[in-house]
Amino acid sequence: MATTKITKEQWAVSESFIAKIKEDNANFAVKNGRTRLAHTETYGCQQNVNDTERIRGMLKKAGFEFTDNAEEADLVIYNTCAVRENAEQRVFGRLGILKHIKENTNPDMMVAVCGCMVQQEHITEKIKKVHDHVDLIFGTHSLWKMPELLYKTMTENGVVVDITQSDGSIAEDVPILRDKDEKAWVSIMYGCNNFCTYCIVPYVRGRERSRKPEDIIAEVKCLVKGGTSEISLLGQNVNSYGKDLDIDIDFADLIRMINDIDGVERIRFMTSHPKDLSDKLIYTMRDCEHVCKQLHLPFQAGSDKILKQMNRRYTKEKYLSLIDKVKKEIPGIALTTDVIVGFPTETVEDFKETLDIIKYVRFDNIFSFIYSRREGTPAAKLDFVLTDEEIHKNFNELLEVQNQICLEKNLEYEGRVEKILVDGRSKTNKSLMAGRTDSGKIVNFEGTEDMLGKYVDVKIVHAKQWSLEGEILR
Ligand code: SAH
Ligand code: SF4
Ligand code: F3S
């Protein structure tokens, strides 16, 4: 289906509801002596984080303020993920707690659940049945309609539900309220066409649709004007950007266009699918001075048998030859990946091939997951070869091998001088500032608040498994 934007008229309807909610919120404030508060929680990937930024953008425009404390909120929104069962269980757990709060201390609280999880009908049915304190449910395709749906929730009785599928539409005009100034996520495409057999994403996010380059460029220029210098381009498979557009453009072309924008210092992107990683993209990464030396290239499994059953459409040999090429063209590049352990038909021998790749490539970091059965996907019908216990044993072995590699990779940084973009306080020690290297490593160092958003040079004095310690050079 061709990609179309939602029309100006459609967005105008949403804006008219934003105005109505704003009026209602103003009346509430007069009556109660305080502004209505919203609380948002995001599960899942950066795409969801970016969607929450849009939700918050719309809520802000409608006169809401925000709180980190769900208990005192007038509106709680959970933006959910369906990729693994534990992500769903966490949301169900949170909904249970909210039920208690709503019954005992905050009866007027509105509860909304949105995102990937509720795009699955059986989940929405379960929420309606088991969690009747939920007032609003809307799926990934209905994000831009949230103002209308929320207004309905505020003014009518009963649960409001919109999980319609509307493949092919992109909402360009939705306002965004971002968390940080110096770094921004920019979605360049939505959906996925790959149908890896274990994965629910294509079912809950719909088919691939690329944003028009002029819209992306306009957003980046606007961000730069507001002080942003690091842009992370987002999509489930950025390497197939542009294939659905009626102009001749691919991801490498888009990167070059962004690289040329004044004020863009760093460009990152995720996620790349190995089957679509072209030589052109590798050369573009090498040649564009603002593209960070970092590549996230999920391989998922090492055995060709499992890769085939996963429908990944590359072999172990192909993957490793890509890695060799990337390392040759961009020396020192930091590599990260995603791995699934315990795909139903995976044997111990298959798993050993996953370990082979880990040991050969020596990734800077990996995101490893135990396979989680997703209803409606082809792999859900397969029988398991290994027991839970055997799968966990393999998983732990993988972690052990990788943890050592992570530390060794970080040790290579000791003594080096690195330019970092300071982006906040250290998560582990609030008296320190933190930032990231070009390659994406976290560096904690003694610094001051006024460094926020700036690039500073630090000398790496100590490497740990998950972060580096640095000393600022003056
Ligand atoms: N589009 C990206 C990844 C999206 S989901 C890509 O193709 O690389 C993020 C990661 O979750 C995947 O890379 C995969 O490792 C993991 N994942 C997806 N479905 C899963 C499942 N059913 N069980 C366990 N892990 C899964
Ligand atoms: Fe899921 Fe595969 Fe699409 Fe990634 S490429 S989102 S793993 S189906
Ligand atoms: Fe999860 Fe949806 Fe992202 S399923 S991983 S939040 S696209």
Image (cartoon, rainbow, N blue to C red):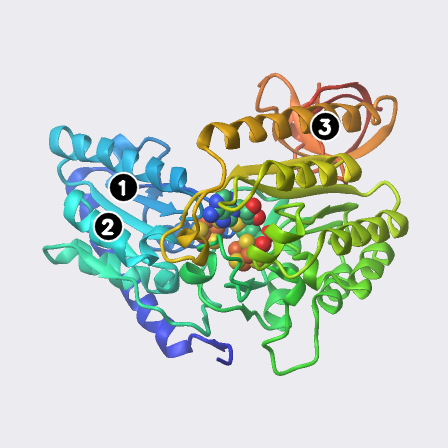
User: Within 10 Å of the Cα at label 3, are there few (<14), some (14-19), or many (20+) other Cα atoms?
Assistant: some
Horizontal and vertical percent position of residue 370: 50, 37
Within-10-Å neighbours for mark 1: few <14, some 14–19, many 20+: some
Farthest residue, direction left:
157
Tell me: is circle 3 under 8 Å from ligand 1: no
Looking at the picture, which amino acid does disc 2 mark? Asn
Q: Are marks 2 and 1 in contact (CB under 8 Å)?
A: yes
Image quadrant in which the C terminus is located: top right
Q: Nearer the viewer, residue 275 or 208?
A: 275
Badge 3 amino acid: Cys
Name the image quarter holding residue 133.
top left
| Residue drawn at point x = 80 percent, y = 56 percent | 285
Q: Dividing the image into four equal quarters, which quarter contains ligand 2?
A: bottom right
- The earlier-in-sequence mark between 3 and 1 is 1
- Separation of residues labelled 2 and 3 (CA atoms): 50 Å
Can you see residue 423? yes
Q: Which residue is mark 2?
A: 25
User: Is residue 359 shown above or below 379?
Assistant: above
Q: Report the amino acid beneath label 1.
A: Thr
Q: CA distance from mark 3 to mark 1?
A: 47 Å
Frontmost of labels 3 and 1 is 3
| Residue 140: image location, x then y, percent | 39, 59
The residue that label 3 is drawn on is: 406
- Residue 442 is situated, as x and y percent measured from the top left of the image, at 69, 30
| Above or below: residue 323 compared with residue 148 | above
